[in-house]
Amino acid sequence: MYVHIRHRTLATFGVLTMCASLGLSGCGGSSLANTDASTVDASTGADADEPPTDAGAVRDGGAADDAGAAQDAGAPEVKGFAGNYSSPTIVRVGATYHAYFAQQNIGGHHYNTPYATFTEDGNFTFHGDALPHMGAETTPGLTWAPGVARIDATHWVLYYTAHRAGTDMQKCLFRAHSSTPEGPFVDDYDGPLYCQPRPLWAIDAYPVRDAGGAWHLAARVDHSGGINTISIRKLGPKGENFASGSTWLVLTSHSDATVWERPVMENAGIVRLRPPTGKPHWFVFYSGGAWYDNRYSVGYADCGTGLSDGACDKKTVNAPWLATDASVDLYGPGTPTFYRNQAGEMMMSVQAWQYSGGKSNRKNDGQIMRTYQITINDNYRPKATLVRVDLH
């Protein structure tokens, strides 16, 4: 059902390993398509028809601000998509919104990447599996966090996380290609796009386009010492491999001092936001806490006018920006993905729980999706205004 409203220290590998081994959705990953990042002018989730915007090379420091920023309003309900909305990634082409979700069972069938379309009024049509066959060196049935981009008019790439076959639950980034958003996306490569050295993980791919039209991939890339980072790396011309000579650039990382982020930082989206006056800034919105209960939340870092130096200023040190709020029926939001609607407004969709308690509450049959309009003021403080809630 759809409600229309206007208005990991690493997560202990034991918890995540159990999550993956049980085939649970929502364990990692959000993504988004058609965003601006590179020097990095990244507006992840801009619609596929949007031309690249100008990128800044000099970083401005955003004004320090507090974390609270969500506004909700009331809403009518309409029918939604049959599955759950875990780890959404959304790309708009014209009047059609293409939505991809993490692996799950729907109607007794397993889907690696459930694919649906919806229109501006929120009516969903489920089309099946965008990735019917996983690639070489993957363990079948364990896929997380799709991220889809239209690299050019006839070339689409779907990035996904999978367990690398023959390893002790090592998670890597894989990719598949298609000539249309419907797919089927085909992973006919020899193996993963990227793996960190064991036992570290690389997960939660998020494709981002810079002002010159070049594509980059953001991801959670783990470092030794139990550190999760949100990092970015330039892609080659077709988006199927990394650019020659490119390396990962850390944008932000988890901190033991930021208690609310424990046990993990992951599932980030990157977006460029323009204030009423002044220069646009780039932001990294990331997920922290535990996806399976009310602790999952969204924080952000302000990267100034460009991302090329990685000098992002984390703003949500003491508290998350978007978190559980029972007064508006918001529970465990995370996995932000950004895109523009037909009016050119920046939207953010996140997974959440319909009822308090996450997986432990039997009334929760997988995640719902909440969609917000995102704006910033002249002090570079982002605001989220709820516009839609998609229920089962």
Image: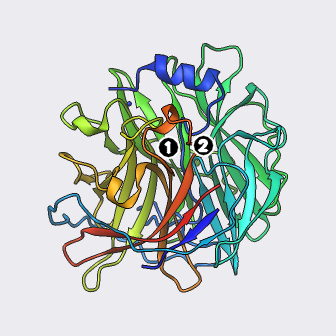
Q: Nearer the viewer, residue 203 or 290?
A: 290
- Kindly identify the amino acid type of the residue bearing the numbered disc 2: Gly
User: Residue 366: which disc?
Assistant: 2
Q: Secondary structure at mark 2?
A: loop
94 left or right, relative to 154: left
Image height of 114 relative to 198, above or below: below
Q: Is residue 190 left or right of residue 87?
A: right
**Numbered badge on residue 377:** none
Mark 1 sits on what residue?
219
Which quadrant of the figure contains the C terminus?
A: bottom right
Q: Percent position (x, y) of residue 301? A: 29, 54
Q: Which quadrant is the N terminus positioned in?
A: bottom right
Front residue of 6/171: it is: 6
- Residue 391, given in percent of the width and then of the height, sits at 60, 58
In the rendered structure, which amino acid carries the disc numbered 1?
Ala
Q: Residue at x 79, y 45 (%)?
A: 131
State the image quarter where residue 228 is shown: top left
Count neighbours of disc 2 (C-alpha within 10 A) and say few if under 14, some if 14 to 19, many if 20 or more: many
Badge 1 marks a residue whose secondary structure is: strand
First in sequence: mark 1 vs mark 2: 1
Q: CA gap, disc 1 to disc 2?
A: 24 Å
Residue 45 location, quadrant:
bottom right
Q: Residue at x 70, y 71 (%)?
A: 123
Note whether residue 237 is visible: no
Q: How is the image coloured?
A: rainbow
| Percent position of residue 98, x then y | 70, 65
Closer to the camera, 62 or 374? 374
- At 85% from the left and 52% from the top, the residue drawn is 184
